[in-house]
Image (cartoon, rainbow, N blue to C red):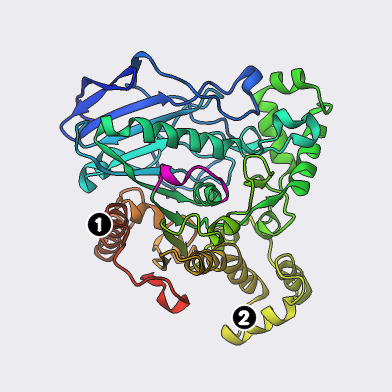
C-alpha cells in the first residue's frame, strides 16, 4: 500500500475513519454484527448499531480455520489473523462521495472450512479503481462454527444451521444501509462468489425478504445445489459432539469448547472423497435445509418467480475436479464397479446408462479419468445449467460460461481446474505463475473481467442468454 492519510465518512449515527491514498479509499475491519462468542456462539448473528467514531483503518479477524500447506505456485498474499470475533467487512471505493457506483459484494471460497476477506492475492483497491465500483468483502463464519446443525441436540435456540450464510446476510444489510455514504448505489448490488462463497450466495434464493438487498449474482463453481438435508446434517453433528465429548443439551460445554478442539473434530467427521462430500447424504459442511434459516430449496425459490428480476451468471471450469486427483486427494479408481458406485451416489437409478454415455462421448479414458469427468459435471456444470433452466422457466434472465484456460505450470496436469477463473474475473494475474505477462492469458483476463464489470453495471455480461447448453460462453 502507498502512504495513506486518514479520512472520515459519516453514515447514519456513526463516523467511519478509513484510509485514503492516490488509488482510492479503504475502510477495513468494520464490525457489522455483534461478536459471535460466549452465549452467541453457534447462534445467528445479532444486529449491531454503530454510534460515534468507528476505527476502520486495520483488518479484523478472519474466521477460525485449519491452515494447510499450499503448493509453491498457489496465490500468495499478506496472510491474515483468525479469531471467533470475525464478523467484519472491508470496503474499497475509488472515492467516498456521492458517486452511486455499482457495488460488488464478494463471498470468499474455501470448501465451507476456510477462507478470508483479506490477506490473499486480490488487489482490491486496484480492482475498485479500475472498474469504478465499490467492492465489499465480508468475513463470515465457516466450518462447524458456521454450519454445524445443532437443532436436534440443543433445541430451537440452535435451529439455524446456516450461521455463516446469515452472517453474509447481516453484511448485506449493512451494505444496503450504509454504502451510499461510501460512493456506492444500494440499489445496484451484485453478489460475486466462488465455490462455497457461490453456494452461500445461491442459497439466498431459498430465503424470504432478501430480494431488495441485491440485484444480480455471479456464481463461480457454486450454483443453487449441494443442499444438505437436515437428517444428514444432524447425524454429522452427532458424530462431531461424540468426538468432543459434549452431551446434547450441555450448552455450557458447547460455549467453552476450545476452538482448536472444534477444528480438530470437524476434520475427523468430514468425508474427504469429492464425490461423497457432494452427493446426497454426503458427510460435509455446507448449506442445510433446516427449515429455519433456509425455509426452502433455492431451486424452489427460483421456480416461484420471486427472483425473476434478478440476473444470474453461473460459471464453471472445464476440469473442476482434476486438481483433487493431481494432488493425490482422490484415490485412483481400480475397476468399473468402483466407478459405477461413484456415479450411483448421484444417480442410483441409471448409473450404468450414464457411464455408457460418457464412454461413447469420450472413448478410451481410464476409470479414474471417467470419474473425474463425471464429478466435474455432476457437482458443478450440470447444476449450473439446471439453475439457469429453472430461472428461465420462471421468467428470469441468466448467462452461463465455461472456463477452459490451462496453465503451463505443473506441466499442464491441472487442466482448467477449480478456482482458476476467479483471478481472471478480477483481472489480476500476478498471483498465477506463468500467467502474468502471458499475452493470451492477459487478453482472457481482460475479457472476463470486463464481462464481470459490465454485468455489475448493466446486468448484461455481453454474451447470449443461456437458453440452452449451446448458448454457454466459453473462455478459451
Report if the CB atoms under discs 1 and 2 are less than 8 Å apart: no
Q: Nearer the viewer, mark 1 or mark 2?
A: 2
The CA distance from mark 1 to mark 2 is 37 Å
Give whichever of 356, 204 is nearer the camera: 204
* Visible residue check, residue 18: yes
| Residue at the left extreme of this rendering | 22
Give, as a single range, the part of the protein colored magenta.
206-214
Q: Is residue 280 left or right of residue 436?
A: right
Quadrant in the rendering for residue 95: top left
Quadrant in the rendering for residue 299: bottom right
- Residue 428: x %, y % from top left: 30, 50
- Depicted 258 relative to depicted 396: above or below: above
| Element carrying mark 2 | helix
Quadrant in the rendering for residue 18: top left
Q: What quarter of the picture does the N terminus occupy?
A: top left
| Element carrying mark 1 | loop
Give whichever of 69, 150 is nearer the camera: 150
- Residue 476: x %, y % from top left: 36, 71
Is-magenta flag for residue 231?
no
* Visible residue check, residue 433: no
Q: Which residue is mark 2?
A: 358
Q: Which residue is mark 1?
A: 437
Give whichever of 100, 76 is nearer the camera: 100
- Residue 383: x %, y % from top left: 56, 64
Q: Residue at x 41, y 68 (%)?
A: 404
Which comes sooner in the sequence, label 1 or label 2? 2
Near mark 1 (Cα within 10 A), the count class, few <14, some 14-19 or many ≥20, is few
Is-magenta flag for residue 207?
yes
| Residue at the top extreme of this rendering | 52
Q: Residue at x 38, y 36 (%)?
A: 176
Give whichever of 384, 240 is nearer the camera: 384
Amino acid at each position: 500500500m502507498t502512504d495513506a492519510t486518514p479520512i472520515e465518512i459519516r453514515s447514519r449515527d456513526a463516523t467511519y475513519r478509513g484510509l485514503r491514498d492516490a488509488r482510492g479509499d479503504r475502510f477495513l475491519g468494520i464490525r457489522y454484527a455483534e461478536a459471535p462468542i460466549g452465549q452467541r456462539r453457534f447462534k445467528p448473528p445479532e444486529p449491531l448499531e454503530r454510534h460515534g467514531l468507528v476505527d476502520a483503518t486495520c483488518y479484523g479477524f478472519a474466521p477460525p480455520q485449519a491452515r494447510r500447506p499450499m503448493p509453491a505456485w498457489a496465490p500468495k498474499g499478506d496472510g491474515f489473523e483468525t479469531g471467533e470475533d470475525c464478523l467484519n467487512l472491508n470496503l474499497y471505493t475509488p472515492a467516498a462521495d456521492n458517486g452511486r457506483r455499482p457495488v460488488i459484494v464478494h463471498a470468499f471460497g474455501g470448501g465451507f472450512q476456510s477462507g478470508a476477506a483479506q490477506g490473499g492475492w486480490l488487489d482490491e483497491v486496484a480492482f475498485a479503481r479500475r472498474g469504478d465500483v465499490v467492492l465489499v468483502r465480508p468475513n463470515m463464519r465457516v466450518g462447524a462454527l458456521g454450519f454445524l446443525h445443532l437443532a436436534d441436540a440443543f433445541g430451537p435456540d440452535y435451529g439455524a444451521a446456516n450461521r455463516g450464510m446469515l452472517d453474509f446476510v447481516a453484511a448485506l444489510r449493512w451494505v444496503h444501509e450504509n454504502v451510499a455514504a461510501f460512493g456506492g448505489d444500494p440499489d445496484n448490488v451484485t453478489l460475486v462468489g466462488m465455490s462455497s462463497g457461490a453456494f452461500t450466495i445461491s442459497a439466498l434464493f431459498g430465503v424470504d425478504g432478501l430480494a431488495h438487498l441485491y440485484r444480480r449474482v455471479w456464481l463461480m463453481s457454486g450454483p443453487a445445489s449441494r443442499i444438505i438435508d437436515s437428517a444428514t446434517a444432524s447425524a454429522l453433528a452427532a458424530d462431531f459432539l461424540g468426538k468432543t465429548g459434549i452431551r446434547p443439551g450441555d450448552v455450557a460445554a458447547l460455549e467453552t469448547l476450545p476452538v482448536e478442539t472444534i477444528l480438530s473434530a470437524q476434520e475427523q467427521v468430514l468425508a474427504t472423497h469429492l464425490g461423497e462430500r457432494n452427493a446426497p447424504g454426503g458427510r460435509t459442511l455446507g448449506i442445510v435445509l433446516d427449515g429455519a434459516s433456509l425455509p426452502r430449496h433455492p431451486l424452489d425459490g427460483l421456480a416461484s418467480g420471486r427472483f425473476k428480476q434478478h440476473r444470474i451468471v453461473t460459471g464453471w471450469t472445464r476440469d473442476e475436479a482434476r486438481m483433487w486427483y493431481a494432488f493425490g486427494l482422490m484415490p485412483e479408481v481400480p475397476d468399473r464397479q468402483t466407478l459405477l458406485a461413484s456415479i450411483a451416489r448421484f444417480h442410483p437409478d441409471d448409473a450404468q446408462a450414464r457411464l455408457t454415455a460418457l464412454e461413447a462421448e469420450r472413448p478410451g479414458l481410464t476409470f479414474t479419468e471417467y470419474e473425474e469427468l463425471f464429478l466435474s459435471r455432476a457437482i458443478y456444470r450440470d447444476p449450473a445449467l439446471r439453475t439457469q433452466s429453472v430461472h428461465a422457466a420462471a421468467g428470469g434472465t441468466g448467462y452461463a460460461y465455461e472456463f477452459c484456460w490451462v496453465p503451463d505450470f505443473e506441466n499442464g496436469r491441472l487442466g482448467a481446474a477449480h478456482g482458476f477463473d476467479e483471478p481472471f474475473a478480477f483481472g489480476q494475474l500476478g498471483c498465477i505463475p506463468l500467467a502474468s505477462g502471458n499475452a493470451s492469458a492477459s487478453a482472457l483476463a481482460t475479457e472476463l473481467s470486463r464481462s464481470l464489470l459490465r454485468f455489475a453495471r448493466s446486468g448484461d455480461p455481453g454474451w447470449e442468454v443461456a437458453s440452452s447448453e449451446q448458448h454457454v460462453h466459453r473462455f478459451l
